[in-house]
């Protein structure tokens, strides 16, 4: 019989991993959550983005947004802000500005 951890265990692991450069661990936790049908919140994906950005891998940090879409989790303002933060920390200012412009369109769409 397999042991099923409470979702809070996964959330706590992501919070801890977001403070480190152990980005592959954060991605693996997200993949396990999706596989085990544990509710994934946008901030969970944000933890992985922050971890990848701490490790200096901005490209993979942005790929977490694709993983988020595949998991069926909607973008929200917190994840958009986290993505912009990762781009700025990675010295990708032009990409951060482009993302900001897209985010503004997204926010206007939400207000409709």
Image: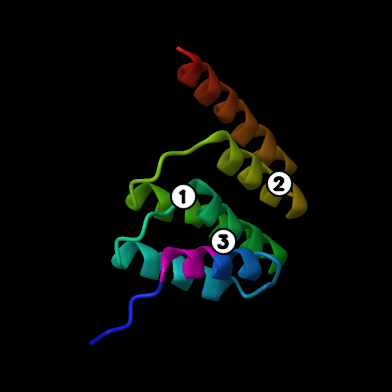
Taking the spot 46% from the left edge, 70% from the top edge, the residue there is: 29
Residue at mark 2 to residue at mark 3: CA–CA distance: 13 Å
Residue 22 percent across, percent down from the top left: 62, 75
Q: Earlier in the sequence, mark 3 or mark 1?
A: 1
Residue 49 percent across, percent down from the top left: 59, 57
- Proximity of marks 3 and 1: CB atoms separated by less than 8 Å: no
Taking the spot 53% from the left edge, 74% from the top edge, the residue there is: 24
* Horizontal relation, residue 40 to residue 111: left or right: left
Q: Which mark is residue 41?
A: 1
Given residues 90 and 45, the one toward you in this image is 45
Taking the spot 74% from the left edge, 47% from the top edge, the residue there is: 88
Q: In the image, is residue 65 part of the stretch drawn in magenta?
A: no
Q: Main secondary structure of the magenta part?
A: helix
Residue at mark 3 to residue at mark 1: CA–CA distance: 12 Å
Q: Which residue is mark 2?
A: 85
Q: Which mark is residue 48?
A: 3
Specify the segment rendered in magenta: 6-11
Q: Earlier in the sequence, mark 1 or mark 2?
A: 1
Q: Secondary structure at mark 1?
A: loop
* Horizontal relation, residue 35 to residue 14: left or right: left
* Horizontal relation, residue 31 to residue 11: left or right: left
Residue 52, located in which quarter of the rendered image? bottom right
Q: Secondary structure at mark 2?
A: helix
Q: Earlier in the sequence, mark 2 or mark 3?
A: 3
Residue 58 percent across, percent down from the top left: 63, 58
Taking the spot 76% from the left edge, 53% from the top edge, the residue there is: 89
Residue that extends furthest to the top in the rendered view of this protein: 112
């Amino acid at each position: 019989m397999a042991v099923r951890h409470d979702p809070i265990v996964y959330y706590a692991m992501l919070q801890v991993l977001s403070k480190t450069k152990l980005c592959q661990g954060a991605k693996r936790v997200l993949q396990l959550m999706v596989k085990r049908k544990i509710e994934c919140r946008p901030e969970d994906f944000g933890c992985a983005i922050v971890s990848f950005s701490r490790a200096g891998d901005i490209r993979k940090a942005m790929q977490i947004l694709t993983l988020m879409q595949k998991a069926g989790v909607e973008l929200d303002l917190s994840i958009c802000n986290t993505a912009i933060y990762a781009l700025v920390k990675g010295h990708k200012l032009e990409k951060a500005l482009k993302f900001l412009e897209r985010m503004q369109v997204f926010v206007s769409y939400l207000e409709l």
